[in-house]
Image: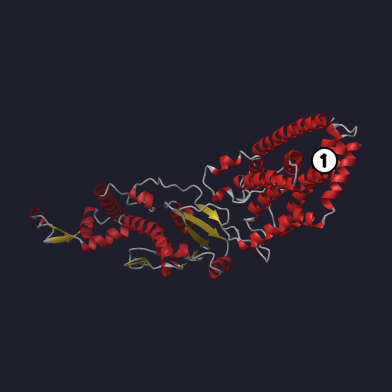
Amino acid sequence: MQSFIIAKKELTLLIRDKLTATVLFVLPFAMILILGLLLGEGFGQKTDDLMRISVLNLDKGFGLNNKPWAQLAIEDMVSTPNIKVEIIQNKELAEELVKTGKRAAVIIFNPDFSDRVNECSFLSTGVNPFHRDGIYLEKLQVSIVTAIIESVCQIALLRIVMPWMIGKAFEKLGDPEFIELLGKEVSLPVPPSLRLLIPKDKIPLGELLQLASGKDAVLAKNYREKVGAGIQTALTGQFKNYNLTGKSWASLTRSVNNAETVNTLTTFKNEDGTGILKRGAIRYQILVPSFTVMFAFSLILISGWIFVAEKRQGTFNRLLSTPVSTPSILLGKFLPTIIISLFQIFFLLGLGKVLLGLKIGLPSWTFSDWMIALIVLPLATSFCVASFSLLIGLLSKNETQLALFSSVPVCLFALIGGCIFPWEMMPDNAKTLAFLTPQGWALDAFREIMPSSFDTTTDFQLIWKSTLVLTAMGFILISITWITLGRIRFGNS
């Protein structure tokens, strides 16, 4: 009961000041909102060396192996080193991205793309898509902008159209129609010993095959097929480094694709948010947990101020001289900070969810997962904050010491812990230093429950580890405070 009386008094002192309430609740959200509006789309995300190619696939036809040719072209781009392919969902979005300058260009494979590629051939009746610098994109129903991305598209299309045309042409060599044409164009010399039977200097190949078949139509067709197969076999042996029947680049060149293709195919995500508040912007997934943790530990200064005020007014010494036990005094001063810290955390998360479209949790979470994320973790964080606050307030003799003992470590720990500058903007070893601070552990866990990269899993082992570390830090700090307060009471008695 005595603890609750002290806690009630402390809580009243903390919340009755409107300016203090503003600093505790309004200021953090205002900073999140302002920074969310000012910062760009790529805030807090590490840039890579990959060139992003945005592609809109409207192809409705089919090509090699019953796959749309556009899909094969996209797979070729994905397998190209240093290329990251991003799939755009519709034409309106593609036009909006280019219009607003968010994408330099979008490659559009139109609905007739596969049909046009299927018509490409070396034959006079087919479509010739080639010119001096590459491929006529308009002949294949491809829309594109800018020269840099066009060169990537040209290379990908060359690698799918050229093998397709060579493979089809090689197959034609075995067709009876081709052999019949060849029989009319190719003439063979007649040996002198056969001049009596064939009174000619030369005889067309087709006529020779007719003579060999005894004018049997079925046998003549069989001979033409054998001639075609022989031509194909001879060419295959002559060009054995290539598979002339292959209709893909890898098959034609007998090559193995060793390019790194992991994580180079993505689907467009609107990371810039919508509306005036940029609701749903990916940067809020970084700003909200960062400022939630930073301002939670800033309570150390506000809670410590009550200690200093009581010391200056003499009420703290009078409290120590009362029969109230040391644990009751600690608990009475401990509870208000925990209550305010929890309220501040839920206040920022709630506003972030409702107003900013903050993503919290995953659809696959169970009830126990939500309890860990929204009850256990905030309690551990608030416990560590309250313990730190009690120790700083007890050690500070005046406002100057309080400012030094609280502001300096809180700001320094917030900087190292990633609350001010995200880890993505720091060197790779910076996160190791962050785990020397309670802010680093808390932030790592809060960012895990608010995924910034649309992860499909949550590392609850990491959350439990952070929770245990924060709780252990809190117990160490509260133990030091207990011992220190006992010595002060013993020294005053």
Is 152 left or right of 86, judged from the image as shown? left
Q: At which x and y percent is residue 455?
A: 61, 47
Quadrant in which the C terminus appears? top right
Front-most of residues 207 and 23: 23
Rendering colour mode: secondary structure
**Point 68% across, 66% down: residue:** 276
Residue with the mark numbered 1 = 333
Q: At which x and y percent is residue 492?
A: 83, 32
Q: Based on the displayed image, in which of its 4 quarters is residue 467 positioned? A: top right
Front-most of residues 101 and 227: 101
- 115 lies above or below 372: below
Q: At which x and y percent is residue 470?
A: 69, 37
Q: Residues within 10 Å of mark 1 (few under 14, many from 20)?
A: many
Q: At which x and y percent is residue 320?
A: 85, 35
Amino acid type of disc 1? Lys
Which residue sits furthest left?
A: 192
Question: So how many labels did they put on this image?
Answer: 1
**Point 76% across, 30% down: residue:** 483
Front-most of residues 335 and 247: 335
Quadrant in which the N terminus appears? top right
Q: Is residue 121 visible?
A: yes
Per the image, label 1 sits on a secondary structure element best described as helix
Q: Based on the displayed image, in which of its 4 quarters is residue 21 positioned? A: bottom right
Q: Is residue 362 visible?
A: no
Front-most of residues 380 and 489: 489
**Point 83% across, 52% down: residue:** 15
Is 111 left or right of 403, judged from the image as shown? left
- 173 lies above or below 462: below
